[in-house]
Image (tube, rainbow, N blue to C red):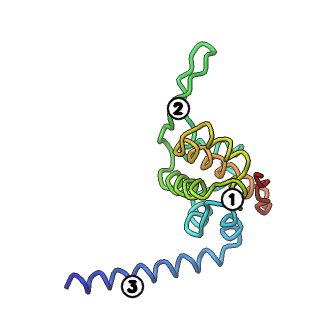
Amino acid sequence: MLGAEIARLDTRLNEIDADLLAQHKANPLSVALAKIPGVGPITALTLVTEIEPGRFQSGRHLAAWIGLTPKERSTGGRQILGGISRAGNERLRSLLVVGATAVIQHAKPGSKTASAWLLKLLERRPRKVAAVALANKVARIVWAMMSTGEAYRGVPRAV
């Protein structure tokens, strides 16, 4: 009985995956966003449905709305930044961080997705901190692509 239920759930999951992929392919902006390393069809479709780029003045504001910026405890002109606040859109934040983690996993000098910026960041920061920083950068790229309509240009390769 349990095996039949698992088979039914697998079939239903395959139907949902096929439906999501069809929706992704039907949306040109979603297809364009999926060209960014670390952004797949599900993340791209979620970004398109959740984000209205006109609501944000810049990519920095979008990253803050998602929750990819540090808490600020500043006083008297002295800026003190803490950890990531976890305020904002939890689903988008987790999708972007998971995608950034996947990019970091394959980041090696000469690889297709490794930028010089990312490799230098990985030399001086832990992988999880670098993943959040990369997710922040991806959020800013997403805002720029959505607000200007430009295609993803890629990153200069590290040598």
Q: Which residue lies furthest to the top in this view?
A: 76
- What is the three-letter code of the residue carrying label 1? Thr
Disc 3 residue crowd, few under 14, some 14–19, many 20+, Cα 10 Å? few
Residue 122 lies, with reference to residue 54, above or below; the image says above
Residue 47 lies, with reference to residue 77, above or below; the image says below
* Residue located at (59% from left, 77% from top): 23
- The mark lying in front, picked from 1 and 2, is 1
Give me the C-alpha separation between circle 2 and circle 3.
43 Å
Sequence order check, earlier mark of 1 and 2: 2
Disc 1 residue crowd, few under 14, some 14–19, many 20+, Cα 10 Å? many
* Residue located at (58% from left, 44% from top): 130
* Residue located at (63% from left, 15% from top): 77
- The mark lying in front, picked from 3 and 1, is 1
Name the foreground residue: 35 vs 86.
35
- What is the three-letter code of the residue carrying label 3? Thr
Question: Would you name the residue on which mark 2 appears?
Answer: 71
Dot 2 falls on a residue whose secondary structure is strand
Q: Give the number of the disc on residue 11.
A: 3
Give me the C-alpha separation between circle 1 and circle 2.
29 Å
Question: Would you name the residue on which mark 1 appears?
Answer: 113
Count how many numbered circles sit on residues in the image: 3
- Point out residue 71 in the picture as x, y percentages from the top left corner: 52, 32
Disc 2 residue crowd, few under 14, some 14–19, many 20+, Cα 10 Å? some
Sequence order check, earlier mark of 3 and 1: 3
